[in-house]
Amino acid sequence: MAASSLPVEHLFTLALQADTSAAYQVRGGPAGRRIIAAVAGGTFEGPKVRGTVAPVTGGDWVTVRPDKSFRLDVRLVLVTDDDAVIYMYYGGIVVDGQARSAPYFETGDERYTWLNNVQAVGIGSIDASGPTYEVYALQ
């Protein structure tokens, strides 16, 4: 029997700033047009974890597919307000500015190792200032 809803817990709101002025594009490839942009920074804030996105450590490898949807491949370094370092990466799909993603986390900081076993989902939107996601842990 299929569930009509999935049990989730809100992890944080993630707001990213992409540096599209320095993006590289690979046009005419077999999968579509690739856009590679640096993540310039950002913030994340939730009930158990909050902090900033480390600048110049992340990137977004977007594939613009023939149907004009985007396939995401994003890697970030999150730095919590109490100085823990967390690697976050996710893939996803964007259609008409609406983004759906599947984030994963890696850290050795004992205060946040619980994130290593979280399967998350991100629901967001993308506008001129960059993407904003609500990130949830599947229960």
Image (cartoon, rainbow, N blue to C red):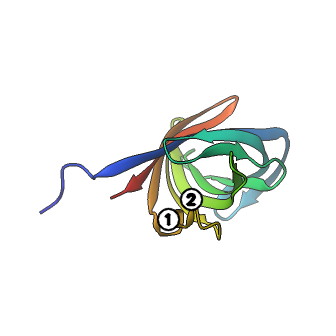
Q: Amino acid at mark 1?
A: Trp
Q: Position of residue 65 (x, y in %)?
A: 59, 52
| Residue 90 figure quarter | bottom right
Any part of residue 15 in sight:
no
Question: Taking 62 as reference, is 113 above or below it?
Answer: below
Disc 2 element: strand
Image quarter where the N terminus lies is: bottom left
Residue 72 falls left or right of residue 10: right
Label pair 2/1, CB-CB below 8 angstroms:
no
Any part of residue 19 in sight:
yes
Image quarter where the C terminus lies is: bottom left
Question: Which numbered tag is attached to residue 91?
Answer: 2
- Residue in front for this viewpoint, 72 or 116: 116
- Image point 47% across, 69% down: which residue? 117
Disc 1 element: helix
- Image point 42% across, 54% down: which residue? 137
- Residue in front for this viewpoint, 14 or 63: 14
Q: Amino acid at mark 2?
A: Gly
- Residue in front for this viewpoint, 75 or 7: 7
The residue that label 1 is drawn on is 114
Residue 102 falls left or right of residue 68: left
Q: Mark 2, mark 1: which one is toward the viewer?
A: 1
Question: Taking 78 as reference, is 125 above or below it?
Answer: above
How many angstroms separate mark 2 from mark 1 (CA)? 21 Å
Q: Position of residue 48 (x, y in %)?
A: 51, 47
Residue 74 falls left or right of residue 49: right
| Residue 107 figure quarter | bottom right
Question: Which numbered tag is attached to residue 83?
Answer: none
Upstream in sequence: badge 2 or badge 1: 2
Graded by Cα atoms within 10 Å as few (under 14), some (14 to 19) or many (20 or more), the crowding at tag 1 reads few
Q: Position of residue 122 (x, y in %)?
A: 48, 48
